[in-house]
Amino acid sequence: MLNIGSVTEAGKSRNIKTGQWRSFRPTVGDMCNGCGICEMFCPDMSIRIITGKCTIDYDFCKGCGICARECPKDAIKMTEERK
Amino acid sequence: METKKKDYLAPGHRACPGCGTAIGVKLILRVLGEDTIVVSATGCLETFTATYEQSAWDVPWIHSLFENAAAVATGVEAALEMRGEKTKVVVISGDGGTFDIGMGAISGMFERGNNILYICYDNEAYMNTGVQRSGATPFAATTTTTPAGTCSFGKAERKKDMAAIALAHGLDYVATASIAYPRDLMDKVAKALTFQGPKYIQLHAPCCVGWGFEPQETIEVARLAVQTGAVPLYEIENGQMTKVFKVPAKKPALEYLKAQGRFKHLLQDPQCAHAAETVQQICDENIKRYGI
Amino acid sequence: MAKTAVMEGSLAVAHAVASCRPQVITAYPISPQTHIMEELAKFTANGELKAKYIRVDSEFSAASAIFGSSATGARSYTASSSQGLLLMTEVIYAMAGTRLPVVLTGVNRTISAPITIQVDHQDTMALRDTGMIQLYVENAQEAYATHIQAFKLAEDHDILLPTMVCMDGWVLTHSFEQIKLADQNLIDQYLPPFAPKYRLDPKNPLTYGAIANDEVPEFRIMIHEAMERALGKIDALALEYQKMFGDYFGGVIETYKCEDAKTVIVAMGSIIGTIKEAVDALRERGEKVGVVKVRSYRPFPGAALFDALKGADTVAVIDRSLSIGKSGPLAGDLKSYFYGKRGPRVFSFIAGMGGRDVTMGTIDSMIEKIKATETADLPDVDFFDVKRQYLD
């Protein structure tokens, strides 16, 4: 932690697991062909395309549902988050 | 095998779910890369990315005050020049800090010809402080300071044409973009960087909380804005319009209005019918003017 | 090569600033600061000063641009007065909070309304709570020396605060004095290149200007502590300057004929020159009077003042400004520091506002007022040289 007042280190937002905000969680089905549109539109850098499939980082995904809405294959479903 | 996209905005930021600005800034940073210093004004972006010990920026970033991002950027550029460093200087500020309170500093920066890319994320109101009207708020929109009521149909003034103001300063590169067209946005950022001197890009970034739609609809609403002509996408290089995003199958303004709570009074209140017509008129004017 | 020449105060300041090798200078005109910026412009135009000289669109931008350049690691400077300083105020608070070591010249000029371009301290007094260090100078040679000391003070890693050298407008900027310009090599030895503690650097990205969750009191306390450390540094830097260059104008304060004084006048700025003359004249008449020049107003040199003044019966603080609704700001600060300690009674005298000259006659009438006031029950504030015909 820097003690010079208004200056702080880079990238430490990663300590805030915004995945806890979710009310709805995306799940990726077999229809996914790894086109990457969801990854382009995710506001929270929570999607990676790994081995040709959309992979959600649930630590940070806020459940906004843009990925599900924009997926051209309808491969992502939003279901209620259950803890 | 992972398709690696290097991001310079970290997850864990505090933007609302579905935030259009977060999408835009992520894409912009992919083009800018690590050799960049970003300057931001006070606003949504600053608030959701930069809390002490929780910064989402992986590039050097500086926030000073609300109205001075352009002036601070001027100083950053000057210091880099004196140090012999070629790092890019980019301002990413909201419409409040650009169209209104930041006008003086921006005009000065444009006039001085500083080598700075100024990107305005336009969510069309002072969103961070609770959705108050700005110079960028479109005609007839409800905001907390232009609420619709028996004596009001929302914002009575038209949207300030900030891109025209940039052009009037003789900027060699002026463009408008939308988060619904990410490749176009990224191409424009890359193209802007090939120019010396000040550049201006206005990025239309819908706000689900402020405009009244569901978070998952952010991209759809952005798309509708372009497809109705409400938000023309164009590129002006060296004073000539070199690219216009044409929409062969245009949509009526009504579809755009229906999609957002901030316009619902235009659909529900017969006294607002004239205002709804004006919105269509504005779209028609854009279509004609830009050849959409 | 040291050189002596008769020159305008503004040119002396421009020489001082230029010899400190600033990298970024911002300029926006306001009387009476303009000559300083014009001389610096000439230096850059002739290639004598290698700096980015940015002509900005307002004082707000002038301060904001050096905010950015200092954060990026460049030695940065600007100057302003009056309305311009007020316009910079928001940025100055941010500079102190962000610990940016810029140097400003505050060319003192009063504040509207009513508008006038004459000197008083109302403008720099409005900035006393910002966290910016304020040093006041008596004459142009001191202005020259103090600017060089100011860069070194600001950039010290124990300090890292914006520092303003306050000099009376017109009186010091537009009058001519014999100025000794120091040797550039010696100045380079006294003041090495700027070595920022942190800066905006893609190789080590940092976030400047983050929102504080809960840390505000601590951040502010840290600035306050840096200011307190500055008291010692100001004294030390002045002595170091004396050793290298031969000139000494005091540290946080300067005392003149105070050793056996029963009455001591305390003031800041160019009127000190007049007061020293008045003190000499009074001493010839057998009056045991002295004067203390306050050089550092922020940080406030309470201990040094008390030490210099504790032996006197009466202290008369002359403020060239007014904290409206209270009294003189310097007097108020001094009285509050002295409260509860065994010390002299303190008068708050206001003179010289709006450029009205403070003369030997003014000082005489102050001494008379002191003598006529027997008790310790003093008025909170007294005004001098009031022209009744303007009052309603």
Image: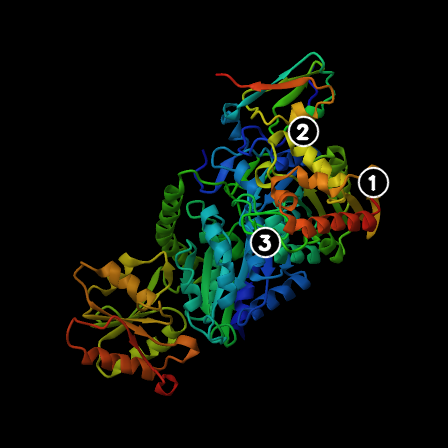
Which residue in the protein does label 1 denote? B246
Amino acid carrying label 1: it is Lys
Name the subunit of mark 1: B
Q: Nearer the viewer, residue B128 or C243?
A: B128
**Residue B225 position in % (x across, y down):** 72, 40
Q: Both on one chain, marks 2 and 3? A: no
Please identify the residue farthest to the bottom as the structure is shown. Answer: C389
Label drawn at residue C279: none
Q: CA distance from mark 1 to mark 3?
A: 34 Å
Q: List the single residue furthest toward the top.
A: A30
Q: Tell me the element at label 2.
A: helix
Report whether C350 appears left or right of C343. right
> Dividing the image into 4 quarters, which one contains the N terminus of chain C?
bottom right
| Residue under numbered circle 3 | B152
- Report, in whole angstroms, how far the alpha carbon at label 2 lies from the one at label 3: 36 Å
Q: Position of residue C36 (x, y in %)?
A: 56, 67
Name the residue located 75 percent from the left edge and 43 percent from the top edge: B192
Residue drawn 16% across the image and 61% down it: C342
Q: Tag 2: residue type?
A: Phe
Distance (Cα) linking label 2 and label 1: 22 Å
Going by the numbered disc 3, the residue's amino acid type is Ser
Q: Nearer the viewer, mark 2 or mark 1?
A: 1
Residue A41: which numbered mark, if any?
Answer: 2
Q: Are both tags, 2 and 1, on one chain? A: no
Q: Are marks 2 and 3 in contact (CB under 8 Å)?
A: no
CB atoms at circles 2 and 1 under 8 Å apart? no
